Amino acid sequence: MSRGRSNPNGKSVPGRTGRRPGQSTTREEILVAARQSFAKKGYDGTSLRAVAAKAGVDPALVRRFYGSKEDLLVAALSSTFRRSELAEVVGGDLDTLGEESIGYMLSVWEKPANRDVLVGMIRSACTNARAARLLRDFFAGQILARIAGALDDDEAQLRASTVGSQIVGLAFYRYVLKVQPIASASPETLRAIYGPTIQRYLTGPLHPPRRRRTAISVRREHGSDGSVPLLRRSTRGRARDSHRRLSANARLTERLDAEPGRERFLGKRLSTHHTTL
């Protein structure tokens, strides 16, 4: 509490409390300190007290501006992906949303301060269930919901989720694992590679085409003697049956070659078989 000052009558008057004159940057300084802490120490290693010490303020002031550590993390992520920029991306042409969205994400991640926060939170999400939930809720609510809202589709949520899997997967592969040559590829190259894939997730078919079945007609015909019903099948089915009969005929010929009187028997057997064909 600030000291009092004396009035002309000698009585003590409380000093001025509250903000100092001029524009305050305390809130921004706290956010910068929080982003640096999340980037370097992750979610587990960050505390409101440590953030306050780095910003040079009282911990109560951090709680006053941002509430809990979870709220502070959401604020740090929100400052990375600005709502106005996201709205501009998803509000453009739907036919180019794939390239625009991955291009925007890469432009954000290529800035070291933003990339460090992202990498720190992805690492935390791999080992901490609460950090994973916070990161998931942020992406679902702040990014994927906006993408789904731009789609006039019954499966907009599924489409947006597939886009999210591609975006987060690329971030993990490029910035956390640093697998080459993805890690050193230029943003322009990655945009050209991933843009069409994400566009297919947004506007292309999601489900495989149904396989066509061989048509079999229900019309029945009778044999020449009028006693044996035959099922008329498709051309493919008839060709398959004919091939089976010919194969059986060849096996029968091989077997009868070694038996006495095969010429007479074989001629009778083949005559009967060709009649059925």
Image: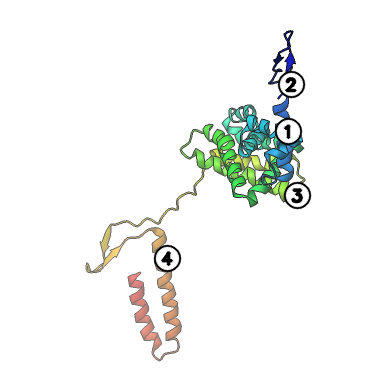
Earlier in the chain: of badge 4 and badge 1, it is: 1
- The percent position of residue 170, horizontal first and vertical second, equals 67, 45
At x 38%, y 82%, the residue is 266
Which mark lies nearer to you, 4 or 2? 2
Residue 145: name its quadrant: top right
Is 187 on the left-hand or right-hand side of 149?
right
Mark 2 and mark 1 in contact? Answer it, CB < 8 Å.
Answer: no
Q: Which residue is mark 2?
A: 3
At x 48%, y 49%, the residue is 209
Which mark lies nearer to you, 3 or 1? 1
Earlier in the chain: of badge 2 and badge 1, it is: 2
Q: What's the distance in space between the residues labelled 3 and 1, CA to CA?
A: 32 Å
Q: Which residue is mark 1?
A: 32
Which mark lies nearer to you, 2 or 3? 2
**Element carrying mark 1:** helix
Q: Nearer the viewer, residue 107 or 39?
A: 39
Q: What's the distance in space between the residues labelled 2 and 3, CA to CA?
A: 63 Å
Q: Which residue is mark 4?
A: 240
Residue 114 visible in this rendered orientation of the protein: no
